[in-house]
Image (cartoon, rainbow, N blue to C red):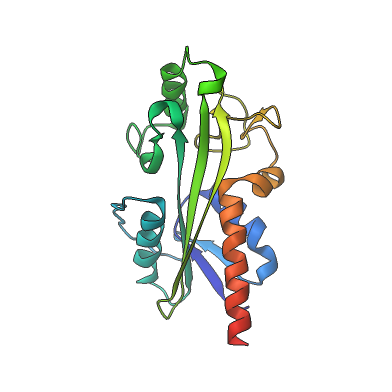
């Protein structure tokens, strides 16, 4: 498959992850900024999938390239699955994640380990130039740790503890994270859909 994917994000860490997974598709992955697209997108959906589609369709209005977008969030069971779809906006868009992460740790200060269950959720949306859409969704289960640990990730990764690895999501390598993360899983599912669509066209 030839061409490129404009991914509806300005997050350099996210683009790096996506390029690693999509590199064998023959499709170049660029950010909105790389593509020169500025879109003021209001994510007013009620689900991750709705928000991902809102973002993808908004960017698709500016380009003839394939567009992809994701919406992801952290669901903490003890906090009634907050911050959920509001994860990026939690405590305000411009609040540094170090402050957001510390706030969550403070809220869970005396909560025992068995009640610290949480998951990352990611919905991925694809919009083709002809308006065709596809979506996928995946999760990564874990717990909220007791401290901010690790330098590899971004967002809530430093407080998201993976019991089976004994590390936070920010302490594992990018390659390892791509294999097990919510975004990695949703993206590989989408990659399979793209390959199927290419077969149908052939």
Instruction: Tell me: residue 197, above or below residue 7.
Output: below
Horizontally, is 46 left or right of 159 in the view?
left
Taking the view exactly as shown, the residue that stands out farthest to the front is 114
Q: Nearer the viewer, residue 19 or 188?
A: 188
Q: Quadrant of the C terminus?
A: bottom right
Asked if residue 16 shows in the view, the reply is: no
Q: In the image, residue 14 lies at what x, y percent? A: 54, 50
Residue at horizontal 37%, vertical 67%? 57
Q: How many marks?
A: 0
Front residue (pair 186, 11):
186
Q: Position of residue 71 (x, y in %)?
A: 44, 51
Query: Observer-nearest residue: 159 or 200?
Result: 200
Name the residue rendered at 48%, 74% in the picture.
65
- Residue at 65% x, 45% y: name it: 180
Residue 31's spot in the image, x, y percent?
49, 59
Question: How far from the left and from the top, in percent, is residue 188?
Answer: 62, 59
Position above or below: 124 against 131? above
Q: Residue furthest bottom?
A: 202
Q: Quadrant of the N terminus?
A: bottom right
Residue 82 is drawn in which quadrant? top left
Q: Can residue 28 be seen in the rendering of this structure?
A: yes
Given residues 148 and 53, the one toward you in this image is: 53
């Amino acid at each position: 498959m030839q061409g490129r994917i404009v991914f509806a994000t300005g997050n350099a860490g996210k683009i790096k992850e996506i390029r690693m997974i999509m590199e064998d598709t023959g499709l170049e992955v660029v950010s909105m900024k790389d593509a020169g697209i500025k879109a003021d997108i209001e994510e007013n959906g009620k689900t991750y999938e709705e928000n991902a589609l809102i973002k993808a369709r908004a960017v698709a209005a500016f380009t003839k390239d394939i567009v992809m977008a994701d919406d992801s969030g952290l669901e903490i069971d003890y906090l009634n699955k907050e911050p959920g779809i509001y994860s990026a906006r939690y405590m305000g868009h411009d609040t540094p994640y170090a402050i957001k992460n510390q706030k969550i740790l403070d809220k869970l200060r005396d909560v025992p380990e068995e009640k610290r269950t949480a998951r990352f959720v990611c919905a991925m949306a694809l919009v083709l130039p002809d308006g065709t859409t596809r979506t996928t969704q995946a999760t990564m289960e874990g717990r909220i740790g007791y401290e901010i640990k690790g330098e590899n990730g971004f967002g809530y990764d430093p407080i998201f503890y993976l019991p089976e690895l004994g590390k936070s999501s920010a302490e594992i390598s990018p390659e390892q994270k791509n294999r097990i993360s919510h975004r990695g899983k949703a993206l590989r599912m989408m990659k399979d859909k793209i390959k199927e669509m290419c077969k149908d066209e052939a």
